[in-house]
């Protein structure tokens, strides 16, 4: 991550966005730690954040709504606001060209939303599952959405055929997060017992083959994400740490902790895979150097726990 030539508005080369329980979303200058803007997210915590493929917008989801904010303007309020969902919306993401979004939530559904109209969300498709949804991820080839939730079942939804397959990596657990690496060859899932399961993906459509089981944490696992070069997987937890694993042999590379850090709710790699951002219950976001394990920078401004962050690096 380079600080050279970065700007703090939409279309910037580097954008760090955080949100949490103080009902705000903050845009940061990543290389300096300066908060550039605060956007209002009334009546709800922020459960997840995702920056659009063109870098102009950030989507946020929370209790009974999905909102879109314009990163290119000074407007502190959402430019799109959908309040037609019940319960918490737990995850949000974009199709690679920004033509549609996907979400998952406590209403036991994953949904696809057409956002091409520009001024409204229109629900196109709904995938029903038997329990509240905690995790939703789109395969890089755009052909499948993988859904996980409190039943412990992972559903692989084929968007072309509308068929689905199911995986149950561990009985009597809750799937907290799922990640697929940028190459589309690896899938990971973490659960509420701190375990991480990894599958190899191959074929067309991609099919999972069990590859590795990691006891990633001794307490509740919260998130898992692959680095852009697919060489690392980060898992975060209620044990107040983020752990970085090498995907070639699943060795633990780094355990990232600070004295003040509490539950680590979210994480994001930089494009060069040299740095990692984390967001914690102590209201701080942090930047870590993965080569040394050193804490490089802290982002201070939230008044309550940070539960979501999104990062867009140069050329992503």
Image (spheres, rainbow, N blue to C red):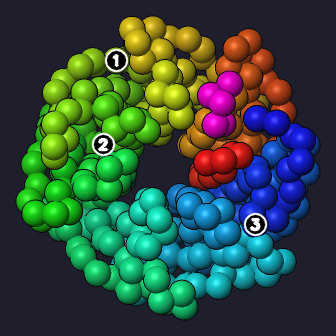
Q: What stretch is highlighted in magenta?
A: 270-274
For the residues carrying marks 3 and 2, which lies nearer the camera in this image? 3
Query: Which residue does the numbered mark 3 point to in the structure image?
Result: 10
Which label is found at residue 309? none
* Residue 41 in the image: above or below residue 307: below
Q: In which quadrant of the rendered view does residue 211 lie?
A: top left
Q: Which residue is drawn at 17% across and 57% down?
A: 158
Q: Residue at x 46, y 83 (%)?
A: 116
Can residue 92 be seen? no
Count of numbered circles on the image: 3
Q: Residue at x 32, y 31 (%)?
A: 186
Can residue 1 be seen? yes
Residue 164 as seen in the image, left or right of residue 59: left
Query: Which residue does the numbered mark 2 point to in the structure image?
Result: 175
Q: In which quadrant of the rendered view does residue 272 lie?
A: top right
Packing grade of label 1 (10 A; few <14, some 14-19, many >=20) is some
Please say whether residue 47 is one of the residues in the magenta stretch. Answer: no
Q: Which residue is drawn at 70% across and 75% down?
A: 70
| Quarter that holds the N terminus | top right
Q: What element carries label 3?
A: loop
Q: Position of residue 143 (x, y in %)?
A: 25, 55
> Is disc 3 in contact with disc 2, using a CB cutoff of under 8 Å?
no
Query: Which residue does the numbered mark 1 point to in the structure image?
Result: 214
**Nearest the eye: 203 or 257:** 203
């Amino acid at each position: 991550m380079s600080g050279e030539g970065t700007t703090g508005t939409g279309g910037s080369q580097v954008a760090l966005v955080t949100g949490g329980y103080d009902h705000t979303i903050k845009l940061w200058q990543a290389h300096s730690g300066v908060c550039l803007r605060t956007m209002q997210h009334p009546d709800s915590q922020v459960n997840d954040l995702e920056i659009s493929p063109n870098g102009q917008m950030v989507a946020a989801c929370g209790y009974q709504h999905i909102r879109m904010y314009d990163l290119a303007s000074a407007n502190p309020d959402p430019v799109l606001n959908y309040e037609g969902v019940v319960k918490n919306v737990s995850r949000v993401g974009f199709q690679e060209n920004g033509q549609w979004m996907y979400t998952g939530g406590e209403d036991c559904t994953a949904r696809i939303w057409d956002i091409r109209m520009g001024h409204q969300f229109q629900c196109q498709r709904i995938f029903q599952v038997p329990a509240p949804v905690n995790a939703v991820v789109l395969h890089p080839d755009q052909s499948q959405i993988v859904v996980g939730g409190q039943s412990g079942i992972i559903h692989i939804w084929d968007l072309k055929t509308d068929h689905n397959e199911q995986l149950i990596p561990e009985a009597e657990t809750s799937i907290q997060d799922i990640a697929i690496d940028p190459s589309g060859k690896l899938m990971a899932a973490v659960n509420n017992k701190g375990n991480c399961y990894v599958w190899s993906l191959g074929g067309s459509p991609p099919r999972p083959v069990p590859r590795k089981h990691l006891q990633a944490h001794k307490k509740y696992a919260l998130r898992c994400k692959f680095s852009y070069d697919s060489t690392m997987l980060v898992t975060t937890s209620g044990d107040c740490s983020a752990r970085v694993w090498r995907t070639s042999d699943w060795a633990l590379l780094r355990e990232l902790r600070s004295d003040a850090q509490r539950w680590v709710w979210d994480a994001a790699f930089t494009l060069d895979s040299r740095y990692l951002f984390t967001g914690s219950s102590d209201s701080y976001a942090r930047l870590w150097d993965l080569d040394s394990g050193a804490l490089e920078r802290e982002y201070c401004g939230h008044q309550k726990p940070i539960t979501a962050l999104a990062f867009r690096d140069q050329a992503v």
